[in-house]
């Protein structure tokens, strides 16, 4: 059978690599990662971004996504990388891409990629989880029993069946606070498989009987390198430094930035 | 009166249901208008899951047409899956729109687009969740007017109890007329109440209001007569036809869903109507005459739509897209224009000829040549004369040989089973045809690795077609023929192993047949099925044949499921939809039915003289086709 090959020269090479921080907010937190990827690729077309493509009959745009927040969980700090076929001004691109996306999928910052791998800088995530119907004290007691354990195995239902996951080991620090309702904050180390807010809540239910009356509202506040104090740093800081700027150059955020959170108290050491 | 959003109540339930993104709205190009700034509020429903309903062109067109008016707003609502339905009932949350999550019960009108009759039970779920009485007779002025549209509205009798009105035909102008009537009636102080408004709908709005017509039955169960019971109401309700599609270039900014849907592409309708005359095809009969969009309007709709959506694929829609008078030019120019933009073009193609392959080659210039689809519909040449699908076996083999030789890897063939006069032998010829296709493909390519898929649907006779009098085959007959066909395909293993066969069993088709040609007595069956838990009947995992059979047995008196489906009708029988005017002469339909039985073919009136189907003369319409000779408009730099 005659095999056809794509005609013409190979696609133009990548001349600029960009790193993108975006947020998933409000009702659009129910966007799954696949949903986001489709919406983002359409936004690239709408904004006329000179994205580079892979070769072959079904060329794919050069977009690579870093570990995405679960469906239903909001995030202020999601990351992806773009390969462009001609260079653009990252600040301008941030504005036009944000306009091309639906409200709630918001561009926060775009920087030119500096040396080093972004994926390697994503060492931990900072989560904030609202616990509806739970008293602050009750949450604090449950967290204490959680932190007292070395390991808490929970069952996670996946496509391939049930899988046992340790929800404790990856939690580096945690605290509760009350703002009318109990709020749990966690710093969780990036592991494979990733430990998600749901896993920690399942563990709290297992060790302390903490049962929620409604689904929790969770948001990823940050992800990035772990600093010496156990806090989560900005993974794009190194790129910004390499490009000679120090502060985030553009904030596409429509909401006021979340108040800075003091570093959570250190967890019991895990052996 | 401010209308509260139901979203705060809904939001905590969403993490507990599958694919919650389908319920949150916020799609690109969706609109939320201020409730109090407009006089008339439309909720538009597609009565199936969001993933099926969102891409529906009818709903998207009306959504945009209505929202462009300063005095109206339109929001969308879809069928919710049973997991969310249960939680909504538990928490007292009503049917909501996805745009502003306003309660459907608060709208002036609920317009429901029925592409298929299998959405009827989903209508009842939505009405019930909305707190709207199921029966139109039980509604008062506080409830929305429920209006049915779409192809199934050409026989709305089975849902006559549940809808207030039905609109036949094109909706673009009809929704404007209804909007004016509702606005004026409200301004006038609502004279005559709900009834007064519905009289205006029927008398001057071109709508069919079932309650204004009485049906009398003969002792043997057939209909004696259908007569209006009010002086203001016309004898027959007439379909709407939009002439000059260039003046209605909708949707201009198609909705872009976040959720994955069944059509991940943008669609541009290149013409409406079809006069190929396939006798089984309701769409071809009820959308006459053919009205083409001109090549330059299509060009600008494609360009504007792509800019507005970012879609990577454009489908050129119609009932038989290769028949557009300028399709060759259109294909070439669009392919030239978008070759470098990674935008692919597709043509839902069913014509079996070499020209179709040229078009497909044009559309796949720089892309993969995966599969081509052809629809001979009938297995034998005799049967294809009965259904007026003029394709010879030699044509088909020649065409697929060309396709394989030009690099296409797979050919898909569509057929129907259960057609009038069909015998087992007619169906078994599909096996021989598929073997010949594999042989031809091997010869054309020199390779044994050739694929052919045979896809078979059950035939359902539809109102306003020459087959409206035909008896359906019973499910046992269908299943036996399909079983024998599979054996015949596999009888020659060396050929059969390269043929895939896809089919549905005969039971859902029989129920679709009941709902398609049913009369008002079928309403009680639908309601009983719904009360027994019937939902999403178009989905095989939700459809229950036993539930429908049981409901027919418990509710119907004097007539039964077989009476509505496997019984052939006589020339003089009053059909439940005779008082609904699609423009087609009943006598012409009957003559065409007789021609079908005599195996006589009928040509297309675009290329041969008018054969008097009745549509143009009855409705004052005319064929609108090119060629215009105009080029695509140049694209302005962005």
Image: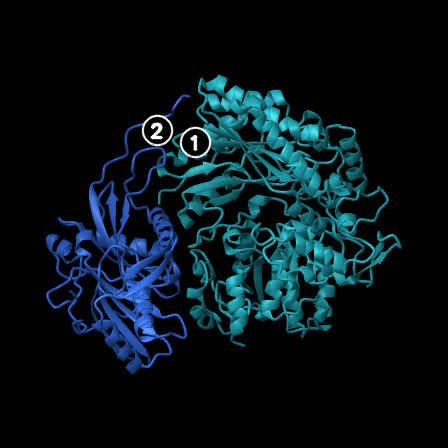
Mark 1 neighbour density, 10 Å: few (under 14) some (14–19) many (20 or more): some
Residue corresponding to mark 2: A6
Compared with B487, A205 (above or below) is: below
**Chain under numbered label 2:** A
Q: Colour of chain A?
A: blue
* Colouring chosen for the image of the structure: by chain
Residue B398 screen position, x and y as percent:
56, 20
Q: From the viewer's perspective, is A15 left or right of B42?
A: left
Q: In the rendered image, is residue B169 in sight?
A: no
Q: Quadrant of the N terminus of chain A?
A: top left
Compared with B117, A154 (above or below) is: below
Q: In the rendered image, is residue B10 in sight?
A: yes
Task: Find residue B66 and report its image quarter.
Answer: bottom right
| Labels 2 and 1 touching (C-beta < 8 A) | no
Residue B389 screen position, x and y as percent:
66, 30
Residue corresponding to mark 1: B364
Mark 2 neighbour density, 10 Å: few (under 14) some (14–19) many (20 or more): some
- Asked if both marks, 2 and 1, belong to the same chain, the answer given is no
B442 and B366: which one is in front?
Answer: B442
**Chain under numbered label 1:** B
Q: Quadrant of the C terminus of chain A?
A: bottom left
Q: Colour of chain B?
A: cyan
Image disc number at residue B350: none
Task: Find residue B473 and report its image quarter.
Answer: top right
SS at badge 2: loop
Q: CA distance from mark 2 to mark 1?
A: 10 Å
Report the residue at 15% width, 62% height from top. Answer: A226
Report the residue at 66% width, 43% height from top. Answer: B506
Q: From the viewer's perspective, is B312 left or right of A140?
A: right
Q: From the viewer's perspective, is A111 left or right of B80?
A: left
B495 and A50: which one is in front?
Answer: B495
SS at badge 1: loop
């Amino acid at each position: 059978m005659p095999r056809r090959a794509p005609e013409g020269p190979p696609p133009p090479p990548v001349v600029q690599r960009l790193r993108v921080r975006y947020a998933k907010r409000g009702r659009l937190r129910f966007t799954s990662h696949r949903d986001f990827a489709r919406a983002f690729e359409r936004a690239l077309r709408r904004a006329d971004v000179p994205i580079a493509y892979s070769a072959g009959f079904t060329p794919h745009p050069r977009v690579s996504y870093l570990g995405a927040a679960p469906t239903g969980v909001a995030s202020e700090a999601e990351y992806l990388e773009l390969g462009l076929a001609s260079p653009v001004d990252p600040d301008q691109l941030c504005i036009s891409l944000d306009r091309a996306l639906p409200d709630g999928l918001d561009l926060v910052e775009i920087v030119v990629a500096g040396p080093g791998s972004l994926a390697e800088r994503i060492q931990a995530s900072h989560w904030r989880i609202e616990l509806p119907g739970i008293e602050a004290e009750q949450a604090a007691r449950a967290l204490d029993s959680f932190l007292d354990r070395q390991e808490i195995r929970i069952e996670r239902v996946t496509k391939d069946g049930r899988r046992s996951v340790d929800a404790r080991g990856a939690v580096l620090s945690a605290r509760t606070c009350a703002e009318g309702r109990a709020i749990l904050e966690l710093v969780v180390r990036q592991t494979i498989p990733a430990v998600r807010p749901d896993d920690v809540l399942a563990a709290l239910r297992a060790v302390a009987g903490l049962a929620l009356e409604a689904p929790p509202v969770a948001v990823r506040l940050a992800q990035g390198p772990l600093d010496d104090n156990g806090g989560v740093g900005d993974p794009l800081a190194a790129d910004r430094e390499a490009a000679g700027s120090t502060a985030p150059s553009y904030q596409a955020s429509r909401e006021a930035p979340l108040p800075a959170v003091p570093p959570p108290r250190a967890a019991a050491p895990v052996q | 009166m401010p209308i509260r959003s139901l979203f705060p109540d809904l939001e905590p339930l969403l993490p507990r249901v599958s694919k919650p993104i389908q319920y949150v709205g916020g799609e690109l190009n969706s609109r939320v208008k201020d409730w109090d700034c407009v006089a008339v509020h439309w909720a538009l429903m597609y009565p199936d899951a969001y993933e099926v309903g969102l891409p529906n062109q009818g709903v998207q067109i009306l959504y945009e047409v209505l929202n462009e008016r300063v005095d109206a707003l339109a929001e969308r609502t879809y069928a919710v899956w049973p997991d969310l339905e249960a939680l909504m009932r538990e928490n007292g949350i009503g049917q909501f729109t996805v745009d502003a999550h306003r309660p459907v019960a608060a709208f002036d009108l609920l317009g429901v687009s029925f592409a298929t009759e299998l959405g009827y039970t989903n209508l009842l779920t939505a009405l019930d969740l909305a707190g709207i009485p199921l029966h139109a007779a039980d509604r008062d002025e506080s409830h929305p007017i429920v209006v049915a549209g779409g192809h199934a509205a050409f026989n709305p009798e089975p849902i006559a109890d549940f809808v207030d009105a039905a609109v036949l035909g094109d909706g673009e102008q009809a929704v404007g007329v209804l909007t004016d009537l509702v606005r004026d009636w409200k301004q006038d102080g609502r004279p005559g109440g709900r009834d007064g408004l519905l009289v205006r709908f029927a008398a001057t709005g071109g709508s069919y209001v079932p309650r204004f017509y009485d049906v009398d039955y003969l002792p043997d169960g057939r209909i004696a007569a259908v007569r209006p019971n009010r002086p203001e109401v016309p004898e027959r309700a007439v379909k709407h036809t939009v002439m000059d599609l260039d003046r209605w270039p909708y949707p201009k900014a198609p909705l872009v869903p976040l959720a994955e849907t069944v059509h991940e592409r943008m669609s541009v309708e290149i013409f409406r109507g079809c006069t190929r005359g396939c006798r089984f095809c309701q769409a071809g009969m009820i959308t006459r005459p053919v009205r083409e969009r001109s090549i330059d309007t299509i060009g600008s709709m494609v360009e504007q739509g792509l800019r507005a959506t970012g879609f990577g694929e454009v489908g050129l829609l119609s009932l038989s897209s290769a028949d557009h008078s300028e399709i060759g030019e259109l294909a070439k120019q669009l392919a030239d224009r978008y070759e470098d933009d990674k935008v692919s073009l597709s043509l839902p193609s069913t014509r079996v000829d070499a020209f179709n392959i040229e078009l497909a080659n044009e559309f796949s210039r720089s892309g993969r040549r995966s599969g081509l689809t052809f629809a001979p519909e009938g297995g034998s040449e005799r049967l294809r004369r009965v259904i007026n699908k003029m394709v010879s076996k030699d044509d088909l083999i020649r065409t697929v040989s060309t396709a394989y030789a030009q690099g296409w890897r797979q050919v898909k063939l569509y057929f129907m089973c259960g057609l009038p006069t069909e015998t087992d032998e007619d169906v078994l010829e599909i096996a021989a045809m598929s073997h010949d296709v594999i042989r031809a493909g091997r010869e054309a390519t020199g390779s044994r690795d050739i694929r052919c898929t045979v896809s078979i649907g059950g035939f359902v006779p539809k109102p306003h077609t020459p087959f409206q009098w035909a008896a359906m085959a019973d499910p046992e007959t269908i299943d036996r023929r399909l079983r024998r066909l599979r054996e015949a395909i596999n009888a020659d293993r060396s050929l059969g192993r390269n043929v895939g066969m896809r089919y549905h069993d005969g039971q859902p088709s029989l129920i679709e047949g009941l709902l398609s040609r049913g009369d008002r007595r079928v309403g009680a069956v639908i309601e009983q099925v719904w009360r027994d838990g019937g939902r999403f009947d178009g989905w095989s995992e939700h459809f229950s044949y036993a539930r429908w059979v049981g409901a027919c047995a418990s509710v119907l008196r004097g007539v039964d499921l077989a009476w509505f489906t496997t019984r052939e009708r006589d020339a003089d029988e009053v059909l439940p939809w005779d008082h609904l005017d699609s423009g087609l002469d009943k006598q012409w339909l009957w003559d065409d039915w007789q021609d079908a039985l005599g195996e006589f073919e009928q040509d297309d009136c675009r290329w041969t003289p008018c054969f008097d189907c009745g549509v143009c003369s009855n409705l004052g319409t005319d064929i609108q086709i090119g060629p215009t000779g105009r080029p695509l408009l140049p694209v302005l730099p962005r």
